[in-house]
Amino acid sequence: MSVVLNLTGLQGAVTIVKMEAISIFEHDERFKSVERAKDREDLFEYYVEELEKKEHAKALEEQKDNRVEYLEFLKSCDFIKWRKVQDLLETDERCSRLEKIDRLEIFQEYIRDLQSEEEEQRKLRMIKDFAAYLVVSSNTSGSTAKDLFTDVMDELEKQVK
């Protein structure tokens, strides 16, 4: 029923759908128990709206689940080239549930995350190799790095006053 509404968008289509609903439900006791036609129409419209909301929510949840499964698929791959991933897409069911553009978008996000993680690891390696860091971190008997920082801040505050 909602397909007709979505495809045409015309007021006439709404009338046709309502007439079809009446012909389907006219012998149902629950339908007959509502006396006014306007009340029946309102109840029907409310039911259709709620049904569409549920269908939409279900579709969103399925889309979210499919995206998560696809991301897990990417993480399970031991390579990060789109060309190689595409070859596996045809055979993996987790991938076929998403549109091609969604798969590409998730892949690009995944690559960006990998690049950010790699950059963070590179920065950490640079810091660990930094001579001043090595000297401070090897100091086990004296002040900690935080203590040294606090001392420098105190000295600077004294100079400002």
Image: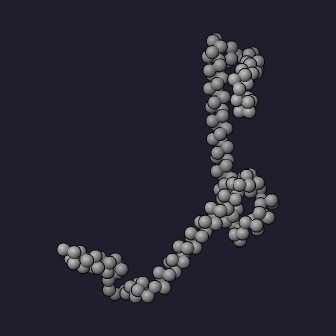
Q: Position of residue 83 (x, y in %)?
A: 76, 67
Q: Position of residue 63 (x, y in %)?
A: 67, 49
Q: Position of residue 113 (x, y in %)?
A: 59, 66
Colour scheme of this structure image? one colour
Residue 17 vs residue 33, the one in the foreground: 17
Determine whether 101 is above or below 136 in the image. Answer: above
Looking at the image, residue 73 sits to the left or right of residue 121; the answer is right
For this orientation, the residue located farthest to the left is 161
Q: Quadrant of the C terminus?
A: bottom left
Q: Residue at x 62, y 26 (%)?
A: 46
Q: Quadrant of residue 134?
A: bottom left
Q: Quadrant of residue 58?
A: top right
Q: Position of residue 137 (x, y in %)?
A: 41, 84
**Residue 34 in view, yes or no:** no
Determine whether 91 is above or below 6 in the image. Answer: below
For this orientation, the residue located farthest to the top is 35
Q: Quadrant of the N terminus?
A: top right
Q: Residue at x 80, y 59 (%)?
A: 90
**Residue 19 in view, yes or no:** yes
Q: Residue at x 66, y 54 (%)?
A: 67
Q: Residue at x 69, y 23 (%)?
A: 11
Determine whether 132 is above or below 74 in the image. Answer: below
Residue 10 vs residue 139, the one in the foreground: 10
Count numbered badges in the picture. Answer: 0
Looking at the image, residue 48 sits to the left or right of residue 135; the answer is right
